[in-house]
Amino acid sequence: MRTARVLLGRLAVNGREIEASYADVFVVVRDGAGTPGPNDWEVTVQAVDAADVEPGEHLLQLEGLDGTTLSGRALLRFRDGNRLLFRGDGHLAGYDG
């Protein structure tokens, strides 16, 4: 099993950019697989302002500090004012491990 963490410079939820003081995507690629499974990735966000994101499924568009561009559907698992945690709910497009 391999893991990777990509620090994010930009994050959009359903096309709406969220200004974040910190954001990352954590990815797990299981042995024998070339890409992460549908729920083998998660996004952690510390928003600058309170993030008005409803529970449920969302389309995330992510840009890493290294220029990596990723996107995928994810479920909002946790929201506490400025902190958000999304769990992947489908293919993470753009991840090449």
Image (tube, rainbow, N blue to C red):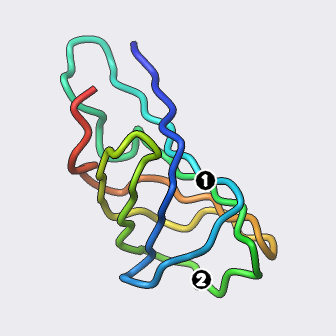
Give the mark nearest the N terminus, 1 or 2: 1
Mark 1: secondary structure:
strand
Give residue 51's quadrant in the image: bottom right
Mark 2: secondary structure:
loop
Q: Quadrant of the C terminus?
A: top left
Which residue, as the protein is rendered here, is positioned at the far right? 81
Q: Which residue does the image show at 36% across and 82% down from the upper left? A: 15
The residue carrying pointer 1 sits among few (fewer than 14), some (14 to 19) or many (20 or more) residues within 10 Å by Cα, namely many
Residue ID for mark 1: 23
Apparent side of residue 24 relative to residue 70 in the rendered image (left or right): right
Apparent side of residue 69 relative to residue 74 in the rendered image (left or right): left
Q: Which residue does the image show at 21% across and 46% down from the upper left? A: 94
Q: Which residue does the image show at 33% across and 64% down from the upper left? A: 73
Residue ID for mark 2: 53
Where 30 falls versus 19 (above or below)?
Answer: above
- The residue type indicated by label 1 comes to Ala
- The residue type indicated by label 2 comes to Val
User: What is the CA distance from the residue labelled 1 to the residue labelled 2?
Assistant: 15 Å
Apparent side of residue 4 relative to residue 48 in the rendered image (left or right): left
Closer to the observer: label 1 or label 2? 1
Q: Which residue does the image show at 48% across and 78% down from the upper left? A: 17
x then y, percent, for residue 43: 53, 52
x then y, percent, for residue 14: 38, 81
Give residue 39's quadrant in the image: top left
